[in-house]
Image (spheres, rainbow, N blue to C red):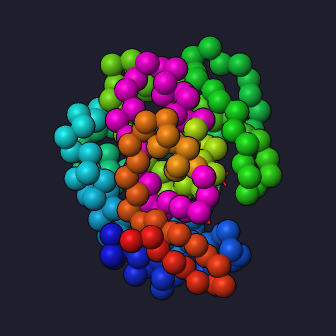
Amino acid sequence: MELLKKRIIEEGIVLSDKVLKLDGLLNHQVDPQLTMEMGREFAARFRESGVTRVVTVESSGIAVAFATAYELGVPLVFARRKKTLLADPDAYCERVPSFTKGIVTDIMLSREYMKSEDRVLFIDDIIANGDAAKGLIKIIARSGAELVGLGVVIEKAFQSGAQTIREQGIRIESLVKIGSLTDGKIKFVE
Ligand code: G4P
Ligand code: NA
Ligand code: NA
């Protein structure tokens, strides 16, 4: 998606050879026009998949997941992060380590909003090691719903998350793939 690449070049700040700060378009500020464009692109790629729900993990994925759900005309559900895990029989829970934040969180999704007859499109903003994504994929599997695929705004192709998820046989559609961040430069995978 050329428009998105242009915005990443203009607004992304390479913090290290692993981390790209994207507060201007994903993690702090949201551009509604650009975000709706991303939603249209994901909707086009998964239009034939019979999606009944879009799902993401709070918080930065919500805007683009909303745009996608709007385009597909289905509800958006976001898994919530909990600091403490009170056993909740009405919810699916998964413990997720966060490499970048150095903490463990629990993600939670009510059974009410994920049914065995659902066909689910999972939208995520950035995939790095993919720990949160793998947690949500486990929850979807436990619910009995069908995961039709994962739509990712930015795939950091030099980290292993997307590759290991593809190896599970899950379709991933990334709008942009970043191959490296070395020497302060953003290199895209074509
Ligand atoms: P994962 O997201 O693939 O599971 O891997 P990781 O544990 O490394 O990522 C933890 C958080 O850091 C995620 O946000 C992820 O989107 C974010 N992240 C990873 N690499 C980058 C990067 O290079 N740039 C930016 N801006 N973010 C990165 P999160 O925990 O889901 O939090 P939130 O943003 O949704 O609140
Ligand atoms: Na994030
Ligand atoms: Na995310």
Quarter location, residue 186: bottom right
Give whichever of 149, 117 is nearer the camera. 149
- Count of numbered labels shown in the rendering: 0
Q: Is residue 12 above or below residue 119?
A: below
Spot occupied by residue 62 in the image (x, y as percentages of width and height): 47, 51
Q: Residue at x 33, y 19 (%)?
A: 117
Give whichever of 127, 53 is nearer the camera. 127
- Residue lying farthest top? 89
Q: Is residue 49 left or right of residue 26?
A: left
Q: Residue at x 32, y 46 (%)?
A: 69
Location of the C terminus by quadrant is bottom left
Quarter location, residue 100: bottom right
Which residues are the magenta region? 135-160
On the question of residue 148 being in view, the answer is yes
Residue 141 highlighted magenta (yes or no): yes
Residue 60 highlighted magenta (yes or no): no
Spot occupied by residue 175 in the image (x, y as percentages of width and height): 38, 62
Q: Residue at x 29, y 65 (%)?
A: 37
Q: Is residue 121 above or below residue 23?
A: above
Q: Residue at x 38, y 43 (%)?
A: 171
- Residue lying farthest left? 48
- Residue lying farthest right? 102
Spot occupied by residue 72 in the image (x, y as percentages of width and height): 24, 45
Location of the N terminus by quadrant is bottom left
Q: Is residue 98 left or right of residue 125?
A: right
Spot occupied by residue 168 in the image (x, y as percentages of width and height): 49, 35
On the question of residue 82 being in view, the answer is no
